[in-house]
Image (spheres, rainbow, N blue to C red):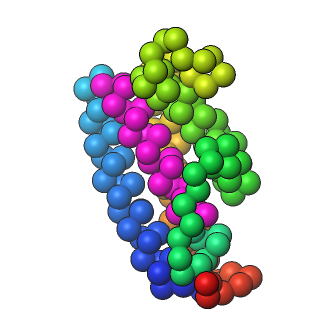
């Protein structure tokens, strides 16, 4: 069973992500790709942290600050296409922050199709998160969060 604190944090993240996805849909329709990329990146970050929260199942939340670790967590717990989207969004976000002179290892343009795909994948990833939360709560985990 999930710790009560974990349930509350994950449920809050799910509601937050659902709201952000509605806003992002409007940004995409309005052609505001840069804003959509920024908020999609934020959505992926929120979901990764919620997934890790479920896997850790600890009373106190430990924020993941390393971006590479977040990508690896997505690869381990979900699907490579989600990790690829997070990486594309991060590189596109970096161009927005640093301009076209940013280091190519850390920045790259993103296409409109990529934004659409990452948005669709974010919706699917949210459903995966909901499923993980439900499964972890009903079947229990290998350890109980007590820290």
Q: Position of residue 68 (x, y in %)?
A: 67, 43
Where does the C terminus fall, quadrant-wise? Answer: bottom right
Q: Give the magenta-colored segment's residue range.
A: 32-52
> Which secondary structure type mostly characterizes the magenta part of the structure?
helix
Place residue 54 in its image quadrant: bottom right
Q: Residue at the location (54% across, 81% down)? A: 59
Q: Is residue 101 above or below residue 106?
A: above
Q: Position of residue 145 (x, y in %)?
A: 62, 84
Q: Left or right: where does residue 139 sit relative to residue 10?
A: right
Q: Is residue 138 visible?
A: no
Q: Is residue 9 above or below residue 85?
A: below
Q: How many marks?
A: 0
Inspect the magenta stretch and tell me whether residue 39 lies in it.
yes
Place residue 99 in its image quadrant: top left
Using the image as rendered, state which of residue 98 and residue 3 is in the foreground. 98
Using the image as rendered, state which of residue 113 and residue 67 is in the foreground. 67
Inspect the magenta stretch and tell me whether residue 144 lies in it.
no
Q: Position of residue 20 (x, y in %)?
A: 33, 48
Q: Left or right: where does residue 108 sit relative to residue 24?
A: right
Where does the N terminus fall, quadrant-wise? Answer: bottom right
Q: Is residue 129 above or below residue 30?
A: below
Q: Residue at the location (68% across, 81% down)? A: 141
Q: Position of residue 30 (x, y in %)?
A: 25, 26
Q: Residue furthest top?
A: 101
Q: Residue at the location (36% across, 46% down)? A: 21
Q: Is residue 105 above or below residue 48?
A: above
Using the image as rendered, state which of residue 121 and residue 10 is in the foreground. 10
Q: Is residue 87 visible?
A: yes
Place residue 84 in its image quadrant: top right
Q: Residue at the location (41% across, 62% down)? A: 14
């Amino acid at each position: 069973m999930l710790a009560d604190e974990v349930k509350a944090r994950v449920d809050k993240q799910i509601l937050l992500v659902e709201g952000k996805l509605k806003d992002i849909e409007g940004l995409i329709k309005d052609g505001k790709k840069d804003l959509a990329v920024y908020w999609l990146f934020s959505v992926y970050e929120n979901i990764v942290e919620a997934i890790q929260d479920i896997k850790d199942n600890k009373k106190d939340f430990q924020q993941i600050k390393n971006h590479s670790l977040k990508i690896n967590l997505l690869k381990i717990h979900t699907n490579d296409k989600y990790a690829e989207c997070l990486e594309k969004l991060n590189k596109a976000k970096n161009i927005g922050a640093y301009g076209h002179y940013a280091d190519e290892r850390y920045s790259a343009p993103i296409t409109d199709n990529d934004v659409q795909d990452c948005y669709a994948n974010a919706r699917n990833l949210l459903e995966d998160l909901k499923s993980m939360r439900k499964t972890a709560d009903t079947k229990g985990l290998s350890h109980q969060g007590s820290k």
